[in-house]
Amino acid sequence: MSDTSKIREHMEVVGADGTHVGTVDKVEGKRIKLIKTDSGQGSHRGHHHYIPLSLFAEIQDGKVWLSANSDVAVMFEEERSDPT
């Protein structure tokens, strides 16, 4: 696994296919927390979503790249609907 300490707030998160997945809010434990306004669609919109750090591949060009394509990565997302 690459150095996750380099993940910073407001970095774009993209799948291995280069497709936008979300924007980093922060790293919490073993997950990347995505900002609410750029996380989820439809009824999932407006909630924090989390990507497991196990999917983190590298940081390149100021973006957080995942080891899975975006359509696979979103299947691993966890959702949290509280106001934090």
Image: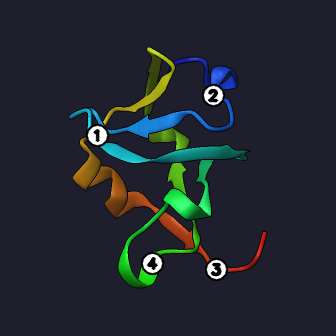
Q: Which residue is mark 2?
A: 7
Whether label 2 touches label 3, CB < 8 Å: no
The answer to which of marks 3 and 4 sits earlier in the sequence is 4
Q: Amino acid at mark 1?
A: Ala
In the picture, which quadrant includes the C terminus? bottom right
Q: Secondary structure at mark 1?
A: loop
At 72% across and 47% down in the image, what residue appears? 29
Q: Which residue is mark 1?
A: 68
The answer to which of marks 1 and 4 sits earlier in the sequence is 4
Q: Amino acid at mark 4?
A: His
Q: CA distance from mark 1 to mark 4?
A: 21 Å
Instruction: In the displayed orientation, state which residue is furthest to the front.
Output: 37
Q: Which residue is mark 4?
A: 44
Q: Which mark is residue 81?
A: 3
Whether label 3 touches label 4, CB < 8 Å: no
Question: Dot 2: few (<14), some (14–19), or many (≥20) neighbours within 10 Å?
Answer: many
Question: Dot 3: few (<14), some (14–19), or many (≥20) neighbours within 10 Å?
Answer: few
Whether label 2 touches label 1, CB < 8 Å: no
Q: Amino acid at mark 3?
A: Ser
Q: CA distance from mark 2 to mark 1?
A: 17 Å
At 65% across and 20% down in the image, what residue appears? 6
